[in-house]
Amino acid sequence: MFRNQKITDDIYYVGVNDRQKAKFENLIPLYDGVSYNAYLIVDEKTALIDTVDIHFGEILIQKILSQLGDKGLDYLIINHMEPDHSGSLRLLRKYFPNMTIVGNERTLSMVKGFYEIDGSLLKVSDEESLSLGRHQLQFFLTPMVHWPETMMTFDHADKVLFSGDAFGSFGALNGSILDENLDIDKYWDEMYRYYANVIGKYSSPVQKAIKKLEHLPYEIICSTHGPVWKINLKKAVEIYDRLSSFQAEEGVVIVYGSMYGNTELMAETVAQGLAEAGVKPVIIHNISTVDLSIILRDIYRYRGCIFGSPTYNNGLFPEMEDLIRKIESRGLKNRIFGCFGSYTWSGAAVRNLTEFANRLQWPMSDVMVEEKQGLKKDNYESCLQLGHQIAEMLQNPVQFNKGC
Ligand code: FEO
């Protein structure tokens, strides 16, 4: 029944869209779904590259059967074992009992661990090749992009890189799977959000992978999530390169928590100071109403961060505590930082935020504002000054690039 979309003459898309799941990994909200991409190569030998989430396993099987007819499936190549891609493995084995599962040593150990499958396995090592006929596949181990077993597969015949999670994004695919046929703009924000939330902790392995593969003449990138990159390939790689090397765009993200509006008024005033000094864009997130996945996206994207928190139970506002823990666990580097806060009887928020910035060695404004109770004239002026100083630090990063 299925007419699978072609990527090249004999490489087909057999992945699916998931518009049902509310949260990716049961953690990260999906506002526009996500795709689980799988690819079928039909040559003298046939090979499937990755599977899909088990909830869509039957559709995957039907798509493969529509393409192959009576021709069997010779190989399943596993670039990544996370169950959003390996979930249909056991089902696939039932339909194609003669299929050989191809993976590296860590992959095959996980095949056994997750699915208790240990027959018809082919272990491959770094840079080893497999011939399907016209297609010569070569495997490149790229550990920790995003799990330890991850690898990428390069097809020398059609110059296609099957990249696993790398260069992926959230967002279901509307009609087509090729970037050249999609309204592509919506995917860029979702690529930043996907990177910051899913891959961000593994920036150093991403850098290693980009460098390891830069000699390959790839012209198409087939990731496990989001569009197939052709005309926007360079931009997709540049975004991953920039994010994984902690480079950022000009702009400042203000994130604040506020129980009764006092810290919020400080946030508005700091933003005014930034705008007076010519900073664009200034992004403001109320941490109580904006999902942390969006806040993290913008912190990965922009060079300046200013956090504001009331003192709560002698510490930070709980959502702010959660945010800084997430940033620290990712080891995000190279941000210019400022902070402010308010308290009623004993201040602790600004001290906590300062210690956070020190731990990450982020250059920090020496203007810090902590108000007792309601915002008053002196600290109103200090909030404006905080905005002005962060603007100056953005314009002269070298002068301030000394840590806190
Ligand atoms: Fe899309 Fe790391 O799995």
Image (cartoon, rainbow, N blue to C red):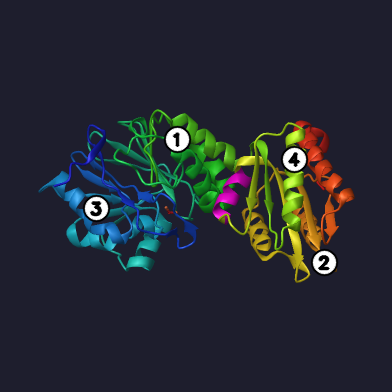
Q: Which residue is mark 3?
A: 60
Question: Quarter of the image holding residue 12?
Answer: top left
Helix, strand or loop: magenta stretch: helix
Question: Quarter of the image holding residue 355?
Answer: bottom right
Above or below, 121 relative to 222: below
Residue at 32 percent across and 54 percent down: it is 52
Q: Which residues are magenta?
A: 292-300
Q: Which label number is shown at residue 185?
A: 1
Q: Secondary structure at mark 4?
A: helix
Q: Is residue 368 left or right of residue 33?
A: right
Q: Between marks 2 and 4, how big is the CA–CA gap?
A: 25 Å
Q: Is residue 2 left or right of residue 19?
A: left
Q: Are circles 1 and 4 on residues that touch, CB within 8 Å? A: no
- Comes first in the chain, label 1 or label 4: 1
Q: Which residue is mark 4?
A: 272
Outermost residue, bottom side: 313
Q: Between marks 1 and 4, how big is the CA–CA gap?
A: 29 Å
Q: Between marks 2 and 3, how big is the CA–CA gap?
A: 58 Å
Amino acid type of disc 4? Gln
Q: Secondary structure at mark 1?
A: helix
Disc 3 residue crowd, few under 14, some 14–19, many 20+, Cα 10 Å: many
Amino acid type of disc 2? Thr
